[in-house]
Amino acid sequence: MLKIESGINLAKFTSIKIGGIAKYFYEPTNTDDFLQVLNYAKNKSIPFFVLGGGSNLLISSTGFEGLVIRTTKLTSINQLDTTHILADAGVRLPHLARFAGNLNLSGLEFSCGIPGTVGGGVIMNAGAHGSSMSELVEYINVYDFLTDSVKKMTNDQLSFAYRSCILKPGSQVVLNACLRLKQGDKNEILAKIKANEDYRWKTQPLSYPNAGSTFKNFSPTQPAGKLLDLAGVKNLTCGDASVSAIHANFVINLGKAQSSDVIDLLGKMQTSVFNKFSIKLFPEWKTLGNFGNKIDDIWG
Protein backbone atom coordinates (compact mmCIF):
# COMPACT_ATOMS: atom_id res chain seq x y z
CA MET A 1 0.00 0.00 0.00
CA LEU A 2 1.27 3.45 -0.92
CA LYS A 3 2.32 5.59 2.04
CA ILE A 4 1.96 9.02 0.52
CA GLU A 5 3.20 11.89 2.67
CA SER A 6 1.79 15.40 2.82
CA GLY A 7 3.11 18.86 3.65
CA ILE A 8 6.69 18.21 2.55
CA ASN A 9 8.99 21.20 1.99
CA LEU A 10 10.49 20.87 -1.49
CA ALA A 11 13.35 23.35 -1.08
CA LYS A 12 15.66 20.72 0.40
CA PHE A 13 15.23 18.57 -2.71
CA THR A 14 16.36 21.24 -5.18
CA SER A 15 19.93 22.26 -5.93
CA ILE A 16 19.06 25.97 -5.58
CA LYS A 17 17.30 25.31 -2.23
CA ILE A 18 14.10 27.13 -3.19
CA GLY A 19 10.57 25.74 -3.14
CA GLY A 20 7.38 25.63 -1.12
CA ILE A 21 5.23 22.85 0.29
CA ALA A 22 4.00 19.87 -1.74
CA LYS A 23 0.46 18.83 -0.91
CA TYR A 24 1.43 15.19 -1.54
CA PHE A 25 4.87 13.54 -1.78
CA TYR A 26 6.11 10.04 -2.56
CA GLU A 27 9.44 8.30 -3.22
CA PRO A 28 9.12 5.00 -5.12
CA THR A 29 11.82 2.40 -4.54
CA ASN A 30 11.43 0.29 -7.68
CA THR A 31 9.79 0.46 -11.11
CA ASP A 32 6.63 -1.39 -10.05
CA ASP A 33 6.24 1.04 -7.15
CA PHE A 34 6.79 3.93 -9.56
CA LEU A 35 4.06 2.67 -11.90
CA GLN A 36 1.70 2.13 -8.98
CA VAL A 37 1.97 5.73 -7.76
CA LEU A 38 1.58 7.05 -11.31
CA ASN A 39 -1.61 5.03 -11.69
CA TYR A 40 -2.78 6.32 -8.32
CA ALA A 41 -2.33 9.91 -9.51
CA LYS A 42 -4.22 9.13 -12.70
CA ASN A 43 -7.12 7.36 -11.00
CA LYS A 44 -7.48 10.12 -8.39
CA SER A 45 -7.05 12.89 -11.02
CA ILE A 46 -4.23 14.40 -8.98
CA PRO A 47 -1.75 16.64 -10.84
CA PHE A 48 1.73 15.21 -10.46
CA PHE A 49 5.34 16.16 -11.05
CA VAL A 50 8.29 13.78 -11.32
CA LEU A 51 11.29 15.19 -9.44
CA GLY A 52 14.76 13.84 -10.02
CA GLY A 53 17.94 15.42 -8.70
CA GLY A 54 16.32 18.86 -8.45
CA SER A 55 18.76 20.68 -10.72
CA ASN A 56 17.67 22.82 -13.67
CA LEU A 57 14.44 23.41 -11.79
CA LEU A 58 12.75 26.35 -10.08
CA ILE A 59 9.89 25.51 -7.72
CA SER A 60 7.54 28.26 -6.62
CA SER A 61 7.89 29.29 -2.98
CA THR A 62 4.09 29.07 -2.80
CA GLY A 63 4.36 25.30 -3.25
CA PHE A 64 2.57 22.78 -5.44
CA GLU A 65 -1.05 21.64 -5.00
CA GLY A 66 -0.41 18.17 -6.33
CA LEU A 67 1.74 15.05 -5.98
CA VAL A 68 5.52 15.24 -6.25
CA ILE A 69 7.11 11.88 -7.08
CA ARG A 70 10.83 11.91 -6.26
CA THR A 71 12.80 9.26 -8.16
CA THR A 72 16.19 9.29 -6.45
CA LYS A 73 15.58 5.91 -4.77
CA LEU A 74 15.26 4.29 -8.21
CA THR A 75 18.94 3.41 -8.50
CA SER A 76 19.19 0.10 -10.34
CA ILE A 77 21.99 -0.18 -12.94
CA ASN A 78 22.58 -3.28 -15.07
CA GLN A 79 25.27 -4.02 -17.64
CA LEU A 80 23.45 -5.66 -20.55
CA ASP A 81 26.52 -6.54 -22.66
CA THR A 82 30.00 -5.24 -23.41
CA THR A 83 28.79 -1.77 -24.42
CA HIS A 84 25.24 -1.28 -23.08
CA ILE A 85 23.96 -0.41 -19.61
CA LEU A 86 20.37 -0.03 -18.42
CA ALA A 87 19.88 2.58 -15.69
CA ASP A 88 16.79 3.52 -13.70
CA ALA A 89 15.41 7.05 -14.00
CA GLY A 90 16.62 8.04 -10.54
CA VAL A 91 20.29 7.15 -11.02
CA ARG A 92 22.41 10.28 -10.65
CA LEU A 93 24.54 11.04 -13.69
CA PRO A 94 27.85 11.57 -11.83
CA HIS A 95 27.42 8.18 -10.14
CA LEU A 96 26.57 6.54 -13.47
CA ALA A 97 29.68 8.04 -15.11
CA ARG A 98 31.92 6.49 -12.44
CA PHE A 99 30.02 3.19 -12.52
CA ALA A 100 30.58 2.99 -16.28
CA GLY A 101 34.21 4.03 -15.96
CA ASN A 102 34.90 1.21 -13.53
CA LEU A 103 33.52 -1.16 -16.17
CA ASN A 104 35.94 0.30 -18.75
CA LEU A 105 33.01 1.97 -20.52
CA SER A 106 33.49 5.44 -21.98
CA GLY A 107 31.03 8.11 -23.09
CA LEU A 108 29.56 9.47 -19.88
CA GLU A 109 32.62 11.44 -18.76
CA PHE A 110 30.91 14.72 -19.75
CA SER A 111 28.05 14.07 -17.30
CA CYS A 112 30.15 13.90 -14.13
CA GLY A 113 29.43 17.56 -13.41
CA ILE A 114 25.70 17.43 -14.09
CA PRO A 115 23.84 17.11 -10.76
CA GLY A 116 20.79 15.48 -12.31
CA THR A 117 19.38 12.01 -12.88
CA VAL A 118 19.02 9.74 -15.88
CA GLY A 119 15.32 10.56 -16.33
CA GLY A 120 15.85 14.30 -16.22
CA GLY A 121 18.99 13.95 -18.34
CA VAL A 122 17.00 12.30 -21.11
CA ILE A 123 14.11 14.78 -20.99
CA MET A 124 16.44 17.80 -20.96
CA ASN A 125 19.01 16.19 -23.27
CA ALA A 126 21.57 17.16 -20.66
CA GLY A 127 25.00 18.03 -21.96
CA ALA A 128 28.41 19.49 -21.21
CA HIS A 129 31.88 19.68 -22.75
CA GLY A 130 30.45 19.33 -26.26
CA SER A 131 28.58 16.07 -25.57
CA SER A 132 25.00 15.24 -24.63
CA MET A 133 22.69 12.38 -23.66
CA SER A 134 21.31 12.20 -27.20
CA GLU A 135 24.61 10.66 -28.34
CA LEU A 136 24.28 7.77 -25.88
CA VAL A 137 20.60 6.83 -25.59
CA GLU A 138 19.80 3.60 -27.43
CA TYR A 139 16.24 3.42 -26.13
CA ILE A 140 14.14 4.27 -23.09
CA ASN A 141 11.16 2.65 -21.41
CA VAL A 142 8.50 5.26 -20.79
CA TYR A 143 5.13 5.25 -19.08
CA ASP A 144 2.48 7.01 -21.14
CA PHE A 145 0.01 8.60 -18.76
CA LEU A 146 -2.67 9.08 -21.42
CA THR A 147 -2.73 5.47 -22.65
CA ASP A 148 -1.79 3.91 -19.29
CA SER A 149 0.90 1.82 -20.95
CA VAL A 150 4.65 1.27 -20.92
CA LYS A 151 6.42 1.49 -24.26
CA LYS A 152 9.94 1.47 -25.63
CA MET A 153 11.11 4.53 -27.54
CA THR A 154 14.29 4.52 -29.61
CA ASN A 155 16.72 7.38 -30.04
CA ASP A 156 15.16 8.38 -33.38
CA GLN A 157 11.67 8.44 -31.89
CA LEU A 158 12.80 10.81 -29.13
CA SER A 159 13.63 13.60 -31.60
CA PHE A 160 16.42 15.02 -29.46
CA ALA A 161 17.20 18.72 -29.81
CA TYR A 162 19.20 21.25 -27.82
CA ARG A 163 18.21 20.74 -24.16
CA SER A 164 15.00 18.99 -25.13
CA CYS A 165 13.35 15.94 -26.67
CA ILE A 166 9.85 14.98 -27.78
CA LEU A 167 8.74 13.73 -24.35
CA LYS A 168 6.03 15.69 -22.54
CA PRO A 169 6.78 15.63 -18.79
CA GLY A 170 3.12 16.03 -17.87
CA SER A 171 2.07 12.85 -19.64
CA GLN A 172 5.18 10.75 -20.35
CA VAL A 173 7.54 9.52 -17.64
CA VAL A 174 10.96 7.95 -18.18
CA LEU A 175 11.30 4.67 -16.25
CA ASN A 176 14.81 3.73 -17.37
CA ALA A 177 17.24 4.23 -20.22
CA CYS A 178 19.56 1.97 -22.17
CA LEU A 179 22.81 3.76 -23.00
CA ARG A 180 25.27 2.70 -25.71
CA LEU A 181 28.85 3.32 -24.57
CA LYS A 182 32.31 2.44 -25.89
CA GLN A 183 35.02 0.19 -24.58
CA GLY A 184 37.86 2.19 -23.08
CA ASP A 185 40.59 2.19 -20.47
CA LYS A 186 39.39 2.55 -16.88
CA ASN A 187 42.28 4.75 -15.77
CA GLU A 188 41.91 7.11 -18.74
CA ILE A 189 38.14 7.36 -18.26
CA LEU A 190 38.40 8.11 -14.54
CA ALA A 191 41.17 10.65 -15.23
CA LYS A 192 38.88 12.44 -17.72
CA ILE A 193 36.09 12.45 -15.14
CA LYS A 194 38.46 13.97 -12.59
CA ALA A 195 39.58 16.64 -15.08
CA ASN A 196 35.98 17.56 -15.88
CA GLU A 197 35.15 17.78 -12.16
CA ASP A 198 38.16 20.02 -11.53
CA TYR A 199 37.14 22.28 -14.41
CA ARG A 200 33.63 22.53 -12.99
CA TRP A 201 34.93 23.62 -9.58
CA LYS A 202 37.06 26.32 -11.21
CA THR A 203 34.35 27.74 -13.45
CA GLN A 204 31.07 27.34 -11.53
CA PRO A 205 29.86 28.80 -8.21
CA LEU A 206 29.58 25.47 -6.42
CA SER A 207 29.95 27.01 -2.95
CA TYR A 208 26.40 28.44 -3.27
CA PRO A 209 23.10 26.71 -4.05
CA ASN A 210 22.28 27.07 -7.75
CA ALA A 211 20.15 25.36 -10.37
CA GLY A 212 22.85 24.98 -13.01
CA SER A 213 23.16 26.96 -16.22
CA THR A 214 20.27 29.40 -16.34
CA PHE A 215 19.76 30.41 -19.97
CA LYS A 216 20.06 28.39 -23.14
CA ASN A 217 22.89 29.33 -25.48
CA PHE A 218 21.67 31.60 -28.27
CA SER A 219 24.00 29.90 -30.76
CA PRO A 220 27.25 27.89 -30.72
CA THR A 221 29.21 31.10 -31.28
CA GLN A 222 27.11 33.19 -28.88
CA PRO A 223 26.88 31.26 -25.59
CA ALA A 224 24.56 32.70 -22.99
CA GLY A 225 27.33 33.12 -20.43
CA LYS A 226 29.37 35.31 -22.76
CA LEU A 227 26.39 37.49 -23.72
CA LEU A 228 25.39 37.91 -20.07
CA ASP A 229 28.96 38.73 -19.06
CA LEU A 230 29.29 41.39 -21.78
CA ALA A 231 25.91 42.78 -20.72
CA GLY A 232 27.39 43.38 -17.26
CA VAL A 233 25.03 41.29 -15.15
CA LYS A 234 27.58 39.71 -12.79
CA ASN A 235 26.73 40.40 -9.13
CA LEU A 236 23.27 41.73 -10.09
CA THR A 237 20.88 40.89 -7.25
CA CYS A 238 17.18 40.72 -6.40
CA GLY A 239 16.62 39.95 -2.76
CA ASP A 240 18.87 37.01 -1.90
CA ALA A 241 19.09 35.85 -5.52
CA SER A 242 22.28 36.93 -7.26
CA VAL A 243 24.13 36.44 -10.52
CA SER A 244 27.40 34.70 -9.75
CA ALA A 245 30.64 36.68 -9.94
CA ILE A 246 32.32 33.53 -11.27
CA HIS A 247 29.95 32.72 -14.15
CA ALA A 248 27.32 35.13 -15.51
CA ASN A 249 24.96 32.31 -16.52
CA PHE A 250 24.56 31.06 -12.96
CA VAL A 251 22.04 32.37 -10.44
CA ILE A 252 22.93 31.63 -6.83
CA ASN A 253 20.94 31.62 -3.61
CA LEU A 254 22.74 33.79 -1.04
CA GLY A 255 20.69 32.27 1.76
CA LYS A 256 17.02 33.13 1.84
CA ALA A 257 16.08 33.69 -1.80
CA GLN A 258 12.45 33.19 -2.80
CA SER A 259 11.24 32.09 -6.21
CA SER A 260 9.93 35.63 -6.82
CA ASP A 261 13.46 37.00 -6.31
CA VAL A 262 14.78 34.60 -8.93
CA ILE A 263 12.03 35.44 -11.42
CA ASP A 264 12.73 39.17 -11.04
CA LEU A 265 16.45 38.56 -11.48
CA LEU A 266 15.97 36.45 -14.60
CA GLY A 267 13.87 39.23 -16.08
CA LYS A 268 16.62 41.77 -15.44
CA MET A 269 19.27 39.47 -16.94
CA GLN A 270 17.11 38.90 -20.00
CA THR A 271 16.47 42.63 -20.45
CA SER A 272 20.17 43.49 -20.05
CA VAL A 273 21.15 41.16 -22.89
CA PHE A 274 18.30 42.32 -25.11
CA ASN A 275 19.14 45.99 -24.59
CA LYS A 276 22.78 45.43 -25.55
CA PHE A 277 22.51 42.82 -28.32
CA SER A 278 18.80 42.73 -29.37
CA ILE A 279 18.90 39.05 -28.43
CA LYS A 280 16.35 37.44 -26.15
CA LEU A 281 17.63 34.55 -24.08
CA PHE A 282 15.31 31.91 -22.66
CA PRO A 283 15.85 29.81 -19.50
CA GLU A 284 16.68 26.14 -19.80
CA TRP A 285 15.23 25.41 -16.35
CA LYS A 286 11.91 23.67 -15.82
CA THR A 287 9.40 25.22 -13.41
CA LEU A 288 6.85 23.87 -10.96
CA GLY A 289 4.05 25.77 -9.26
CA ASN A 290 2.42 29.18 -9.67
CA PHE A 291 4.61 32.15 -10.58
CA GLY A 292 2.05 34.62 -11.87
CA ASN A 293 2.18 36.33 -15.27
CA LYS A 294 5.89 37.22 -15.29
CA ILE A 295 6.92 33.69 -16.11
CA ASP A 296 5.13 33.69 -19.47
CA ASP A 297 7.29 36.45 -20.90
CA ILE A 298 10.55 35.14 -19.46
CA TRP A 299 10.09 31.56 -20.64
CA GLY A 300 8.39 32.59 -23.86
Image: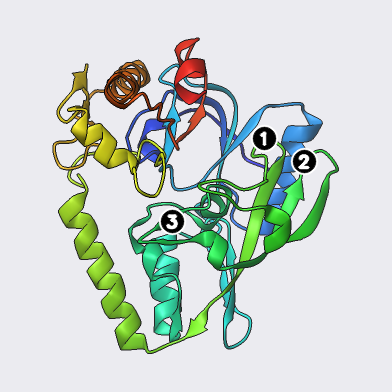
Q: Position of residue 73 (x, y in %)?
A: 52, 55
Q: Position of residue 280 (x, y in %)?
A: 41, 26
Sequence-wise, which precedes: disc 3 or disc 1? 3
Residue farthest to the top, as pictured: 293
* Residues at circles 2 and 3 in contact by the CB criterion of under 8 Å: no
Q: Residue at x 17, y 28 (%)?
A: 232
| Mark 1 surroundings: few (<14), some (14-19) or many (≥20) residues within 10 A | few
In the image, residue 123 sits, relative to residue 65, either above or below, namely below
Q: Secondary structure at mark 2?
A: loop
Residue located beneath label 3 in the image:
127
Residue farthest to the right, as pictured: 147
Q: Which is more toward the observer, 296 or 54?
A: 296
Q: Position of residue 82 (x, y in %)?
A: 58, 88
Q: Residue at x 61, y 53 (%)?
A: 160
Q: Is residue 102 left or right of residue 145?
A: left
In the image, residue 74 sits, relative to residue 185, either above or below, namely above
Q: Position of residue 208 (x, y in %)?
A: 20, 40
Determine the CA span between mark 2 and mark 1: 8 Å
| Mark 2 surroundings: few (<14), some (14-19) or many (≥20) residues within 10 A | some
Q: Is residue 170 left or right of residue 101?
A: right
Query: The residue under label 3 is which amino acid type?
Result: Gly
Q: Which mark is residue 145?
A: 2
Query: Marks 3 and 1: which is nearer the front?
Result: 3
* Residues at circles 2 and 1 in contact by the CB criterion of under 8 Å: yes
Q: Which is more toward the observer, 160 or 104?
A: 160
Residue located beneath label 1 in the image:
170
Q: Is residue 195 left or right of residue 49?
A: left
Query: The residue under label 1 is which amino acid type?
Result: Gly
Image quarter for residue 95? bottom left
